[in-house]
Image (cartoon, helix red, strand yellow):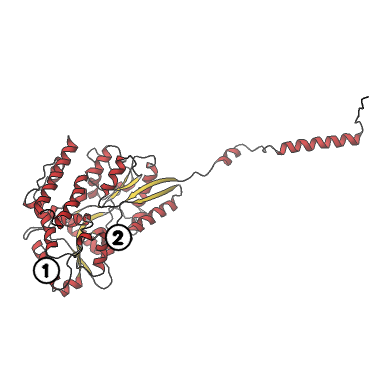
Amino acid sequence: MKLVLVVNSAPVRRVASALAVAALCLLAACKPAPQAAGEAEAGAIAVSAPVTITALIWAPDWPQEMQRIAAEFSRLNPDIKVDLQFMIGNSVEENLKPKVASRKLPDLMSVNPNPYAAELADQGVLADVGDAPAWQRLRPGLKADWISPNGKHFGVAGGVAATLIYYNKRMFREAGIATLPTDFAQFLDVCERLKRAGFTPLYWSGGFPNLIANGAFSFGFANNIVRTTPDWKARIADGTLALDNPAGADIFAKLHTLAQRGYTQPDMMRSGYAEGISSFVEGRTAMAFQGTWAAGSLLHPAGFDVGVFVPPWHARGVASVPVIGSETGFAVGETVNKAQALRFLEYISGAGFAIQQKKRQNITPFTTATGEQQGDPQILAYLAQIERAPVTGSPYYSMLPANTIDLLHQLIQDVLSNRLTARQAARRLEGSIRDEAHRNNK
């Protein structure tokens, strides 16, 4: 027997209909609501993660300022994060060579305006920054430093580099020194008088030979070689520069003489860069053979006034050949982040330069200053003085091959430690220049 239920009354039909509508509504709730045209696309856009660029920087005396520059750049450019790393050791080149060899080049890096960096540019490792506003603003006298043999504009200077002697006016006065020395013989006399008065005449950074190379070696090379060899740059390039002679040996002999006569601090072979700054500003040495880049640290210590003069690394009766060129600067690698690195380069050379220059009081390399870039009046006056010289030399890092730069540091230490004579050091330096030229030109 089959039982059939027939629903035919109006109230029952209304209930069934209501249940059906509710079921449809529940099904509709499981599906997304329709969107207006373009609404889906706009809602799908996500904020991109910032691009991280690597920056390998030479900043032995201003790491905090470089950190501020990177942080401020990222604050103003939230789409770019800077992975900041600092170079160590005695040279920019010894930091870059392993990066180049392993093909792990940073996006932005410190470089020197020398044959090594120029070759990296011609090989396509460094980007051409000739269209960058920072390059366009470089002082005309510095631009040639940053153009490779093939015409690549491979970097931007970090400042105008000149080396000079800072001196403690109180110590000079107490030692009875009323006249600044104008040749090397007079300089030795000044050192002797300071020593007899109980002062350490000069700080020598034997543990950081980079500084001695920047100062005493570069001035010795300028006055002994550049003065008499107009084509010295071409001779370095083709390996024919003669240094195994009295003029070349004298460059190293001057370093040795100052050390042997006790005109430097006793622990000179263990002394580094930072100790040199503190030794001078704390009144433990009478003179500091330093660069314009350290003016902010050296010129205004508590307790005494500081003066500056051209290092008299020349013989009596001839004019000094001072040293001037580009500070270590910045280059951009041919990497996937080149565009972002170029933006960072522009910031370092613009508003970022004012951040580091406020401490260092170095000389702006740009024709149009951005922000507070005036520099210390004594340094600006020194620059004006040496720019009038008919002949000038270059900082050692901008003229020597990379491997020769590394060798020179060791030669300086060997001469100061009596492991090599001045003539032996000059002979080895000449040989390195010759070997590097043959290697590059074969």
Which x, y percent locates residue 279? 24, 66
Residue 1, quarter of the rendered image? top right
Give the residue type at disc 2.
Arg
Residue 30, quarter of the rendered image? top right
Give the residue type at disc 1.
Glu
Q: Is residue 196 above or below residue 255?
A: below
Does residue 218 appear in the picture of this structure? Answer: no
Residue 168, quarter of the rendered image? bottom left
Alpha carbons under labels 2 and 1: distance apart: 31 Å
Q: What is the secondary structure assignment of the residue under circle 2?
A: helix
Q: Residue visible at 14% across and 70% down?
A: 195
The residue positioned farthest toward the front in the image shown: 419
Between marks 2 and 1 in the image, the one whose residue lies nearer the viewer: 1
Which x, y percent locates residue 146? 25, 45
The residue positioned farthest toward the right in the image shown: 1
Q: Residue visible at 27% across and 40% down?
A: 120
Which x, y percent locates residue 113? 24, 47
Q: Which mark is residue 51?
A: none
Few, some or many residues within 10 Å of mark 2 (<14, 14–19, 20+): many
Q: Which residue is mark 2?
A: 360
**Horizontal arrangement in the rendering, residue 23 relative to residue 264 (left or right):** right
Q: Tag 1 or tag 2, which sits nearer the N-term?
A: 1
Q: Which residue is mark 1?
A: 192
Quarter of the image with the C terminus in it: top left
Toward the viewer: 84 or 206?
Answer: 206
Give yes or no for contact between labels 2 and 1 (Cβ–Cβ under 8 Å). Answer: no
Does residue 297 appear in the picture of this structure? Answer: yes
Toward the viewer: 261 or 325?
Answer: 261
The residue positioned farthest toward the top in the image shown: 1
Q: What is the secondary structure assignment of the residue under circle 1?
A: helix
